[in-house]
Image (cartoon, rainbow, N blue to C red):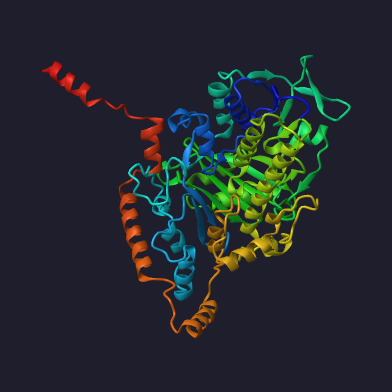
Amino acid sequence: MRKPINRIIICGGGSAGWMSAAVLSNQFPNMEIALIESPDIPTVGVGESTLGTINSFLDMLGLKDEDWMKECQATYKYGIKFTDFYEKGEAFYYPFGIKDTQNTQQGLTDWYVKKALNPATPNSDFYESFYSVMPLIYNSKVYDNKDGQLPGFSFTNDVAYHMDATAFGIFLRDKICIPNGVVHITANITEALKDAEGYIDGLVLDNGDTLDADLYLDCTGFKSMLLGQTLDVPYDTFRDVLPNNKAWHCHLPYDDKEVEMETVTNCTAYNAGWVWNIPLYNRIGTGYVFDDKMYRDDEEALEDFKEYLKNTDYMHYAKNVDDLEFKLIDIKNGCHRECWKYNVVGVGLSYGFIEPLESTGLLSVQEILLRLCETLHKPIVNKVHKDNFNFVVRNIMSGFKSFVGYHFTLSGRRDTEYWRQAGEWINMDARIEDPKWDDTHTNLSEMANRMLQSHDLPGEPYMGGIPDIFVGMNHIPVNTTQLKVLEGLLLARNGEIPEMFTQQTQDYWDQKKQYIQMLADDAPSHYQYLTDTIYEPKEVVEEDAVEEEQVSEA
């Protein structure tokens, strides 16, 4: 930067804008921060699903569940369920928490060997063996693990949330940003002024004011008013890997909260894409993400979505599907070549977007803000710092792209044209064409090969769920042929075959499953837990007060 950063203008509200204002005002209390929000741009309000990393954001702001969840109709989320992605009638999971590899010889490889030795072992046994939360997920129960009985799971750090993202932005505005001194300006930006070097020199508003700052955050959504339109930063599409480009969405009423308020985001593969199911406390958000090349027009896609709703077993109210209000969203998979250009940083959709399958929307906002704060804390911000910021952020987005791409290209479905082409039209060797980005994460074939060769994929950023997706898609890195070859080599070399999978490991898994099932049986339902702890908490009466009252009555 040409001068120290003391004044920041955030262009755009919504969840991205107010998350930015909340974090920056928290981390830099001496900076002058203003947010300009248009009164004419409606919010989407589809409901938002998060990952466990959102907890670090909430912790930074000092927010506890009881502070904000009720304001945002939020519920808990223990993982993601993928229905019909590998084959119709089958489901697999991406549970949250650390994989419990106690009493194993070689970590996840123990289970792969078990599967090879016993092919009839269902793939669901993988999740049940390594993740303590599976009985809770199956039965939509909540156990806060305050007694530490669930190995590898922290209710504080690992549980994520479903929330009304619009309400979340409003909550941050009123309870964090404005009290922290953020200036809220309601106006439209009519022009962005540039100086001779290309930097933003000021913003002209429709009320006649012209405002300037040292740094501008572009939170204007897909419009990308500053980063894309004014600075003309090139945009790299991800459609070669992620072809879905539209979504129909609506809100659904509950029929039975005890049953329908799941502890997962349920994603169901459908004719030309997939359908999300996000249970908030007051309603369910649902939507159909699709590739419009598979339909004659958007209305045909809508009719297809309605047929899905009418035939979904747990949506008993779907018989009134024609009374629902449907809205169409355009999806733009990809990101701009640079996130930080001159004195502009793109946050949220204005920088880039990965389709919502793995809940990376708010996560990408959070990650950009985290890296931005790390950079702004430096004594002076120069080109090296900005280049490093851009490189890290770009790699994060490319990693997201690869991860989500697996959910389509590894599918075994061939029942529709969309799924027949899924493994062919998605470019498994796709890379960003700009040679300055040495980005191995975008090569899906390379990542798959590493997984199948190394069994446990080591340390890729935000890739902890790759083994879960691979197992769910029936891509197991150890098979009977490999075991036979390995046995022969070991026998020739050592004269004996060491135990690769022991009864001790199986006994531990069996005992753990039985014990956790017992905890789950006694745990309250998701709906009941939320009602008792967040939405209608019962007053806790101190024992001393009760005793005094009893004495007084006597």
| Residue 39 in sight from this viewpoint | no
- Depth check: 255 or 319 in front? 255
Q: Position of residue 154 (x, y in %)?
A: 42, 45
Farthest residue toward the left? Answer: 554
Residue 367 shown left or right of residue 160 in the figure = right
Q: Is residue 282 above or below residue 191?
A: below
| Residue 251 in sight from this viewpoint | yes
Q: Position of residue 188 (x, y in %)?
A: 75, 22
Q: Is residue 424 above or below residue 529?
A: below
Residue 528 shown left or right of residue 386 in the figure = left
Q: Residue at x 57, y 34 (%)?
A: 165
Q: Quadrant of residue 225?
A: top right
Q: Residue at x 57, y 38 (%)?
A: 47
Q: Quadrant of residue 210?
A: top right
Q: Quadrant of residue 325?
A: top right
Q: Position of residue 190 (x, y in %)?
A: 80, 23
- Depth check: 275 or 164 in front? 164
